[in-house]
Image (spheres, rainbow, N blue to C red):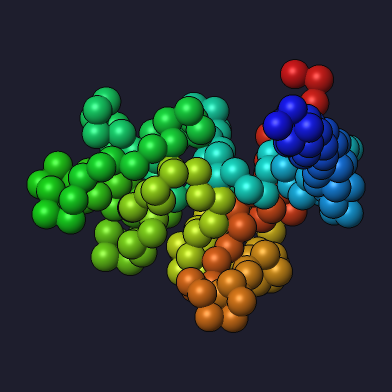
Amino acid sequence: MILGALRQMRVAVVVLVAAVALLGFVYPAAVWALSRIDTHSAEGSALRDSSGCVVGSSLLGVDPQPAAGEPDPYFHTRVVGSVADGDPGTPGDPAAGLPTNQGPSSEVLAAFVAQRRTQIAEREGVTPAEVPADAVTGSGSGLDPHISPAYAALQVPRVARETGRTEDDVRGLVAQYTAPPQWGFLGAERVSVPELNVALGAAAPDCGS
């Protein structure tokens, strides 16, 4: 009986040591090694300008905002809204990234969408009817870095004017940073706002500040 108990104890110790070695050393080392294959993604897809400054991440949609009274050379992400504070589109603050938690029949949400549509139409110099749906509705996280090609196209004239580029030049950059549906069938075409702003040289530098 004692020998049986000792055998079971030995098996338990062997399993414990093997589990510690596998889960405490082998698995973390394997994950670390895999992360080195694509260091760009491992570093959070950090975006850098021509001087090497980190100016954002391709995975994080932070809506850039010009200083008061300054020109607006940026492509803008989808809105970040909060019903709690009554803000129809809290700009530039990733800490405000959250859904409204309002259903499609909500009168509060409908009012916010209408106000957002008016604000964006005024900014882009178009009629409210020309503003696409993703411009006035947020994603579930509020931090989606992508917009639809339609929303990007709406912003092209303003960005071209404020950056001193031709509209054809800006449209070419939009096309360059437009990705197809994932795996060819999941979702829709999408434009990366962070990458587009960096390519335009419109992203605010984050080095030494």
Q: Residue at x 33, y 52 (%)?
A: 136
Q: Against 7, is 194 above or below? A: below
Q: Against 37, is 14 above or below? A: above
Residue 39 visible in the current orientation: no
**Image mark count:** 0
Question: Residue 144, position in %: x, y?
Answer: 51, 50
Residue 34 visible in the current orientation: yes
Q: Nearer the viewer, residue 140 or 32?
A: 32
Q: Nearer the viewer, residue 102 or 37?
A: 37
Q: Residue at x 63, y 48 (%)?
A: 59
Q: Nearer the viewer, residue 136 or 94?
A: 94
Q: Is residue 81 left or right of residue 94?
A: left
Q: Quadrant of the C terminus?
A: top right
Q: Against 72, is 104 above or below? A: below
Seen from this angle, which residue lies furthest top?
209
Q: Is residue 126 left or right of residue 4?
A: left
Question: Residue 22, position in %: x, y?
Answer: 81, 42
Q: Is residue 95 left or right of residue 166?
A: left
Seen from this angle, which residue lies furthest front?
1
Q: Residue at x 13, y 48 (%)?
A: 106
Question: Residue 127, position in %: x, y?
Answer: 29, 61
Q: Residue at x 51, y 74 (%)?
A: 186
Question: Residue 152, position in %: x, y?
Answer: 52, 62
Q: Quadrant of the N terminus?
A: top right
